[in-house]
Image: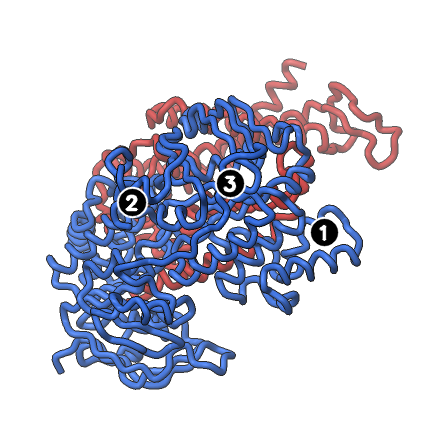
Amino acid sequence: MQNSINFSSSSLDPRVKLIASMSFLILISTIHDALILFLSFIAVLCAWLLAKLPIKTVSYFFKSIALLFAFMFLSSTVFSRIAPKERLTFIEVIPAVIPIIGGSGIYAEILLASITFSFRTLSLVSMALLVSLTTEPSRMVSALRKLRCPYELTIMVIITIRFIPLAIEQWKKLAAVANVRGIETSGIIGRIKSIKRLFTPLIIHSIRRSMQLAYSLDARGFRATENPTTMENLQLGSRDYLMLVFSVLLVALSIIVLLEVFSIQNISVELLKLVV
Amino acid sequence: MNSLIHVDNFSYWYSNTEKPALNDLNLKIKKGERLLIVGPSGCGKSTLILCISGLIPHSNSEGKIKGNITVGSENLHRTPPYHLKNKVGVVLQNPSAQLFSLKVKDEVAFGPQNLGLPSDEIQERVYFALEAVEMEKFAEKTLTELSMGQQQRVCIASMLAFRPAIMVFDEPTSNIDLKTGRKILALIDQISENQNITVIIAEHRTKEVSKITDRVIVLNRGEIVADDPQILTDTKFCNTYGIQPLNTTIYPSLQSNITNGSKIVQVENLSFSYNNHSVLTDLSFSIFERESLGIIGENGSGKTTLALILAGVLKPKQGSIIIDGKPIGKYKRKQAIMKIGVLFQNPDDNILTTKVSNEVLYAPWIQRLSEDEKKKLLNENLDQMNLKGYDNKGTFKISYGERERVAIASLLVSQPNILIFDEPTTGQDYKHKQDFIKLAQELNETHTLITISHDLEFLSAISNRVLLLDSGKIIETHINKNMAQNNSKRFPKESVQLSIMEN
């Protein structure tokens, strides 16, 4: 996936991207209204459009995001409870007469709450994805370093990302070995069983691999000095300052919302009541 | 004080061992010298590499050290290799296990970053190092996209970025075919020449490496038994220590010469593709019962894929494979392993458990055989593989060769009639190759063998017929060494040509 992405050199400074997405996170955590959160998700979508990522990448990630949304929405709708007095019942899935699990149904308030919850998560996930897809890993490391994130931590993150394809490769090898020892690894049942059987060998091989990696890190002078530098020389441009101002505005807006200077938290509920 | 590296009465013990891995070594290495270290597996080559590169004791400080190693006027045990005036760079075995960044340039920049250099100097060094290994066009590539040879180049570049005075290599050409191996050695030669770097290489491929080195030491049981560039021409001496001599290589030759009889494997019009990329195209061949067939081809020619298809692990897109009168797809997994067993490249990857007895009894355990049956199978197969008394040993605590035999035993418990060996000797010493051929000889009396390798010399010793695979197609179905020597020009692939002409 990552290979097909062309990182644009004119993109924002990764530090600014991190700060901006952090202020966005603060803002949408303070908002509890479905309509506004939906609008914020649309705003993130606009940012995706502006990023001009390859269609293939976009469709791949949005399929996953859609799946996540469907799962969160359904589960929170069906399994949430609400006090009987307050609810506007649409459909009762499991009648309240059945003890313990009874009382599940689709209620207007819960529907709203699920929409709120799902869109908040959705905005966050797609924002984070956008930032990681449009930032070159080495620039991100440089940014984290400049933001005083511990060096060991940034290296660990990089190694973890890099390790995933290696672990998959190792898994395939082990599956083939298990195969020639008589274990069926294809089909759903075969796959589930092979997870149980191959997990321990995978861990053993990973530990052995990590020991080799330790040599390699040490040979390259890992922690040779107190202050390792970075290859990328990050400098803020005018667009970066603009974005920073925007981030400050976002945080200011969250404070206004928190202080309840004006009420935006109930717009959707009021609208709904008008309709019903 | 003409020499750059001084090893003085140096001994090293790994933790919890009585016997030293290196025993009272004395060695002086001059500036600009190119040293080749040879010796049988377990002779202490890799330990010496780790000690000279300073990884022992700066990365692994568990063992015990006696004596000194000095580089220039600095003691290597006090100063880490990257802080020395004459820096030591090290390239270990298996490049893919050493790389950890996402992109080539990040990997190379990692060292200079750790030294705390300013960013423009880091960029300059990255460019310089990548140019030196002819990889400057790959700076923006992801490491997983690169071939083995290219990954090895990145490993070298990431050390060059330190501007080392000494470079140490542990088996730089193992796991890669002859052609790529040669290019890597030519590169090392060029780097050493251009930047005046002292080079130390530990290798099994003496024929290749000795061309670029000017001094040879032979290690055995942690001691230097010879220090003489001419020693590799002494066939008798080399055979005593299991080193590949320069002039002649004598492999025991396989006795059986079966070229007819009943066909145990029949492959017809086999094609396989992976992600729309064609790996095997229209292969047809058959293997006779108790034959020993070799399959030769370069890295990436589709050899391993073929092995996996023959064993029924991968399903072909087209074509049929008949094993013992029945299509392989018709066998259930449990039945298939009684017909065909595969030993994968690198015995480490063939290991699923941590105890020898569990490893050997893996298939019987899956099939829920009774304890008595399992015990009988265990004893029988450990005996056959010369592993008597190994039941309770740890699979990762025994030697490479022993681990390989454990892996073979774990296949033999299912009593297959066909055995496939995928690159059984890559990166292994001469003695291991000889031992493996002897083992194959014994197995061939009762089994049909298929051996996959990129080493024609080894293949022509182990098999009675060699099949040449090139970019997923069969080019020749019947080559042997003598025939090949006379017609080497007929073979299109450079590496096969080379390996034929060399021998």
| The chain coloured blue in the image | B
Residue A156, relative to residue B150: is it above or below?
below
Q: Position of residue B400 (x, y in %)?
A: 48, 61
**Kind of element beneath mark 3:** loop
Q: Residue at x 31, y 54 (%)?
A: B173
In the image: residue B257, left or right of residue A226: right
Label 1 sits on what residue type? Trp
Q: Which residue is mark 1?
A: B365
Which mark is in front, 1 or 3?
3
Q: Which residue is mark 2?
A: B500
Label 3 sits on what residue type? Ile
Q: Disc 1 and disc 3: Cα gap in Å?
A: 36 Å
Q: Residue at x 24, y 50 (%)?
A: B182
Q: Which residue is mark 3?
A: B258
Q: In front here: B169 or B311? A: B311
Q: Disc 2 and disc 3: Cα gap in Å?
A: 23 Å
Q: Quadrant of the N terminus of chain A?
A: top left
Q: Quadrant of the C terminus of chain A?
A: top right
